[in-house]
Amino acid sequence: MNVAVSLSLAGIGKENTNVRIFVDPGAARNIHEIQVEGDFGKFTCRIENVPSPGNPRTSYLAALSAIATLKKITEPLQIGT
């Protein structure tokens, strides 16, 4: 749901964002498939997140993202965006 809400806020809004959620208890990864359609054409992206070793209920990518954000806030030198 976090991904769906983030996409709707960054995109066309919650009223115009369609979400389908599938549950597979046997899945080894958390998979997000994102399809965007507009006047520009169509864009499709698939992400397969590996579970966090310390907490398999969340993705390893979420932990890495949090660490990167904290580093960006606390480090005085920033290279890139």
Image (cartoon, rainbow, N blue to C red):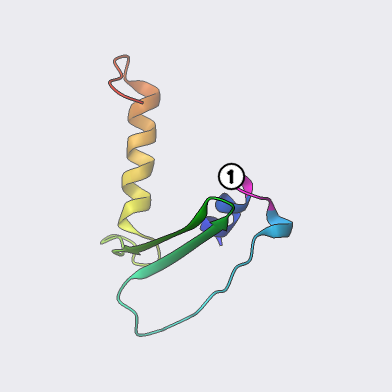
Please provide percent x and percent y for residue 48.
32, 65
Tell me the quarter of the image containing the C terminus. top left
Please provide percent x and percent y for residue 72.
36, 27
Judging by the rendered image, the residue that carries numbered circle 1 is 10
Please provide percent x and percent y for residue 27.
34, 80
Q: Main secondary structure of the magenta part?
A: loop
Q: Magenta span has 10?
A: yes
Write the start and end of the magenta stretch as one range.
Answer: 9-13
Location of residue 79 (image quadrant): top left
Count of all numbered marks drawn on residues in the image? 1
Location of residue 78 (image quadrant): top left
**In front: 69, or 48?**
48
Q: Magenta span has 60?
A: no
Identify which amino acid the numbered label 1 is placed on: Ala
**In front: 24, or 32?**
32
Q: Residue at x 32, y 71 (%)?
A: 29
Badge 1 density bin: few <14, some 14–19, many ≥20, Cα 10 Å: few
